[in-house]
Structures are given as structure tokens and as C-alpha cells.
Amino acid sequence: MMEIKHRQVHSNGITLHIAEAGQGSPVILVHGFPELWYSWRHQLPALARAGYHAVAPDLRGYGDSDAPEAVESYSMVNMAADISGLLEAIAAEKTVFVGHNWGANIVWDFARLYPRRVAAIAALSVPCRPRTPQPPTEINRSFSRGHFNFVVYFGRLGVAEAELQADVRQTLRRFFYSLSADAPPEVVTHLYTSKPADAGVLDGMPDPPVLPAWLTDADLDYYACAFERAPASAEHSIATAIWIATGKNSPASQTS
């Protein structure tokens, strides 16, 4: 198997941990929530074998990357600047980006802010959405139509942290399973369209009696150890090659 190497790089005033494999044209893989570089552990060697330099960072606040305390440190402007600094660290002027979930949102905003540094985008689960005059909080409340909304819930400082950190391993197990195609299809529908607004984030997320085939105990251990150690807390046109993929049972395909 192609070796995955790890190192720390300086970017935008912080230190990012990156995992990388291969040589050639760079491909940046940006993870979502609750994830890490580890989500790309299978894609890194595959891209390396195909002749690419595959790079997967732990985003700020995750894993072995720095986690600034100030909430404003996690603005999309800063997240995009982190990626720009990563390109400087690997001596890449322009590259292909693959973003999943929250990582796809970061990639889309990076393309708005740094359009000349984007060769192509592959977005998994999250399509590009234009900016609107309304604040994002209002858009999210409107989208949920009086029901639970993940983004609104996570915006309540300290509330999500208390719930998610009570049992990190169980939290991750329920998140990964409930938002996957292995969960009953009605689970995602409930979580995004009918869950009560005052519910906790884990309410309605079943705890699988057995892990799905794609998630081993060792995988779960890796994620749990990382999150226990460091818990995560003007428009431009995009003119580049874009590929968007959603699974049949993906929340994006059922609720957009």
C-alpha cells in the first residue's frame, strides 16, 4: 500500500496537520463534520497510485491542527485562508479540491475568495449556493420550518459541546451511522424535516448494535481519541470544472 506521510505546516497564523501521499499534481481533500483527515484514508493512496499528490488536512479545530479559542477564528474567511496557506506550504499555485459535507462549503467559499487557485472542484453532498441578502442564521431557520436545525443548534455556544462530549465514542457512532445509507431511510427524513426544534442533536439518532462494515472499531477509536483530545468547536463567480455527487440516501438529496 502507498505510504501516507504526516507533517505539520504553518498556514494563516496557525499550524495545520496534513496527511499526504504520492507525487504529481496536487489534490486537496477537505473533510466535513465530525471528521478528520482520516476520512480520506482510502482515497489518499488511491490518488497517489493514479499519479497525484494527495493532501488531506485536519481543519483548524480538529485532530492535530491548532484549535484557536475565539469563535470568530472559525469564520469562513479564516477557513479559506487556511487552505490558501496550505497551498503555499506545498508550493502549489493552483489545484483540484474535493470537499465533503462542511468541507464542501469551505471549498465553495475558497473558490469565491481565491478563484485563480482553483483548477476544479468535486463537491460531495453539498451543492454551491449563492449568497443571499439574509443572514445565514435566518436562512437556516427558514429552511427548518420550525423544526430542529443542526446549524442553529451548533450556534448555541456550549450547548452542543456539552451534549457531544458526554460520550465522544457514542456520539461519533450515532452520527456516522444515522447519516449513512445503512440507517433506516426514515431516520434522515426525521432528522432534517420533523425533529422537534428543542431536541438535542443526538435525539433521533439510533445507536447501531453492530458497526457497519465500512467502520471498524479501530476507525472509531482513531476518531474518538482525536475528538477527546481536541474537540471541534462579496460574491465572485466560480468559473471552473465542477463535479457534485450525492448518495441516494444522502441528506442533501432528500432535503434540498
Image (cartoon, rainbow, N blue to C red):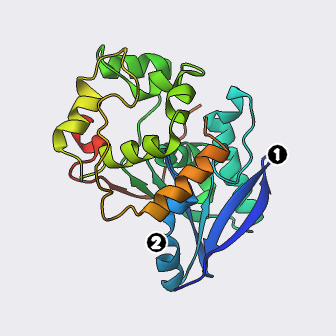
Residue 145 visible in the shown view: yes
Find residue 11 and report its horizontal and vertical position in percent: 77, 52
For the point 39% across and 53% down, the residue is 124
Label 2 vs label 1, nearer the camera? 2
User: Is 162 in front, or is 178?
Assistant: 162
Which percent across, then down, holds residue 10?
Answer: 80, 56
Viewport quadrant of the C terminus? top left
Between 193 and 239, the one lying in front of the other is 193
Q: Disc 2 versus disc 1: distance between alpha carbons?
A: 30 Å
Q: Is residue 202 above or below residue 225?
A: above
Label 1: which secondary element: loop
Going from the N terminus, do you reach mark 2 or mark 1 first?
Answer: 1
Task: Name the spot of residue 144 as percent of width and height, x first.
Answer: 32, 21
Placement of 104 over or under 4, stated as above or below: above
Quarter-wise, where is residue 188 in the image?
top left
Residue at horizontal 23 percent and vertical 47 percent from the top: 183
Assess disc 1: are there few (<14), some (14-19) or many (≥20) residues with their C-alpha within 10 Å of its C-alpha.
few
SS under mark 2: loop
Q: Which of the labelled discs sits on residue 42, or is there none?
A: 2
**Which residue is more in the foreground, 236 or 125?**
125
Callout 2, which amino acid?
His
Residue where numbered disc 1 is placed: 13
Q: Residues within 10 Å of mark 2 (few under 14, many from 20)?
A: few
Residue 237 can be seen, yes or no: no
Left/right of residue 195 with respect to residue 102 in the rendered view: left
- Label for residue 156? none
Amino acid found under the numbered disc labelled 1: Gly
Q: Residue at x 30, y 42 (%)?
A: 252
